[in-house]
């Protein structure tokens, strides 16, 4: 078992207080958006004993990852665990499928776009399914609303919905997102005026969202895109799974996020980062309807069931009894509340460890809440 020191990503949208509070450190005034636990080359976790987790696993990958993971995903940790603390909305985005990521990566390599270039979409050849589990109340936009609900909402805000009604969601979304710049700005102005003037009855939340997004990203067409998505509020412990092509944006709150080890993001707006609408359109799913809110199932270790082979997220609520975690290959444990004991070591809130597959079953005791990340196969 190895104690980890994890890098913090200071993206501008980050909360200034949530991650310091988790780690028991004073806030430093700057945003702290994400804590990364894993081996992603751009920000790998470090071992307390020295070196990075990546270097450690590379020395004896099969022993540490376990046979099933090693055979399927090779000599690397297949997942990346994060604590995400959003003080402001993140970009409107979707992630590619495995086949799309491989093709996209090859295309950009052939075109000679450097890996670090801002306009580079595909940073690796992997897909990036993800699950976000709320630690605080967590607001997100996830997947398209039922089209008839979008028609009603946009009509209430005074927008022309004829393309949406006659030609459907895909055509409407493409039409709006590819309008010339001035027309996009005009459309957003119209929405902002409507939202400010008379909040449409029943759509107060959506009107607030328009005003909030417009204050951050004036005249950004992503605001129209955002209105077409389901507005979801998760309570602590509830989660959303986001598969390939799901259009989403996290708005506010703190959560534990687990994903395939990839950085492939296609953005449609609401960001100062690179936006590539044609590429986004090529991967989007236009399935509509409310997303499934996931709750963990099981006993002392409760699992969030998803179809992703790359990862499995579970939560362990510790009280009187100790809990034995069966081995599912390499694992990361993150204590988000209380104080627990693992292999004789006391871990306080904010502490995290890597445990290799070769260590077998692990007993956890104490009082607190622990999140566990493993591969989805074992
Ligand atoms: Zn995402």
Image (tube, helix red, strand yellow):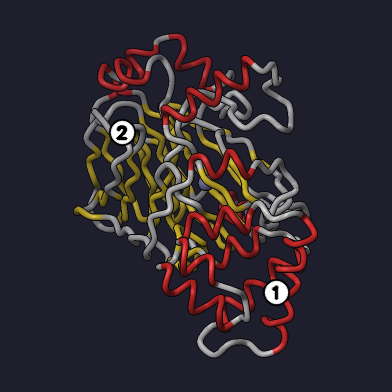
Disc 1 is placed on an element classified as: helix
Mark with earlier residue (2, 1): 1
Quadrant of the image containing the N terminus: top left
Estimate the spatial distance between the alpha carbons at disc 2 and disc 1, rounded to whole Å.
Answer: 39 Å
Q: Check the image and report above or below for 219 versus 83.
A: below
Instruction: Kindly report which numbered mark, 2 or 1, lies closer to the viewer in this rendering.
Output: 1
Residue farthest left in this picture: 299
Question: What is the number of the mark on residue 309?
Answer: 2
Q: Check the image and report above or below for 378 versus 368.
A: above
Picture quadrant of residue 263 = top right
Q: Check the image and report above or below for 41 versus 222.
A: above
Question: What is the number of the mark on residue 211?
Answer: 1
x 70%, y 21%: residue: 113
Question: What is the number of the mark on residue 122?
Answer: none
Q: Check the image and report above or below for 223 versus 331.
A: below
The reply, left or right, for residue 45 in relation to residue 10 is left
Residue 162: image x %, image y %? 53, 71
Residue 374: image x %, image y %? 34, 34
- Number of marks drawn: 2
Instruction: Decide if ligand 1 comes within 8 Å of the CB at mark 1.
Output: no
Nearer to me, 88 or 145: 145
Quadrant of the image containing the C terminus: top left
x 63%, y 54%: residue: 177
Residue 282: image x %, image y %? 51, 40
The reply, left or right, for residue 120 in relation to residue 94 is right
């Amino acid at each position: 078992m190895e104690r980890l020191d994890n890098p913090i990503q200071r993206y501008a949208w980050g909360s200034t207080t949530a991650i310091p509070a988790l780690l028991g450190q004073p806030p430093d005034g700057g945003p702290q958006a994400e804590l990364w636990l894993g081996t992603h080359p751009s920000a790998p976790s470090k071992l307390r004993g020295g070196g990075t987790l990546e270097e450690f696993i590379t020395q004896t990958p099969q022993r540490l990852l376990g046979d099933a993971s090693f055979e399927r995903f090779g000599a690397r940790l297949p997942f990346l665990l994060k604590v995400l603390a959003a003080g402001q909305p993140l970009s409107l985005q979707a992630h590619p499928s495995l086949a799309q990521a491989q093709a996209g990566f090859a295309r950009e390599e052939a075109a000679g776009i450097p890996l670090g270039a801002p306009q580079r979409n595909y940073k690796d050849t992997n897909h990036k399914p993800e699950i976000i589990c709320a630690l605080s109340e967590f607001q997100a936009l996830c997947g398209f609303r039922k089209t008839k609900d979008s028609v009603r909402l946009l009509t209430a805000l005074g927008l022309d919905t004829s393309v949406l009604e006659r030609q459907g969601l895909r055509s409407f979304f493409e039409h709006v997102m590819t309008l010339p710049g001035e027309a996009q700005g005009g459309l957003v102005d119209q929405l902002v005026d409507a939202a400010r003037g008379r909040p449409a009855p029943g759509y107060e939340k959506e009107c607030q969202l328009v005003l909030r997004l417009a204050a951050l990203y004036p005249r950004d067409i992503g605001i129209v895109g955002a209105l077409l998505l389901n507005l979801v509020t998760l309570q602590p412990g509830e989660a959303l799974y986001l598969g390939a092509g799901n259009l989403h944006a996290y708005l506010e709150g703190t959560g534990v996020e687990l994903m395939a080890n990839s950085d492939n993001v296609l953005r449609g707006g609401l960001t100062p980062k690179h936006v590539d609408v044609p590429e986004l359109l090529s991967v989007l799913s236009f399935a509509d309807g409310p997303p499934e809110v996931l709750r963990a199932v099981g006993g002392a270790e409760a699992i969030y069931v998803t179809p992703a082979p790359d990862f499995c997220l579970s939560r362990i609520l510790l009280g009187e009894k100790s809990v034995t975690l069966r081995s599912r290959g390499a694992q990361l444990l993150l204590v988000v509340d209380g104080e627990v004991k693992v292999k004789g070591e006391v871990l306080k809130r904010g502490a995290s460890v890597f445990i290799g597959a070769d260590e077998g079953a692990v007993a956890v005791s104490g009082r607190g809440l622990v999140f566990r990340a493993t591969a989805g196969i074992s």
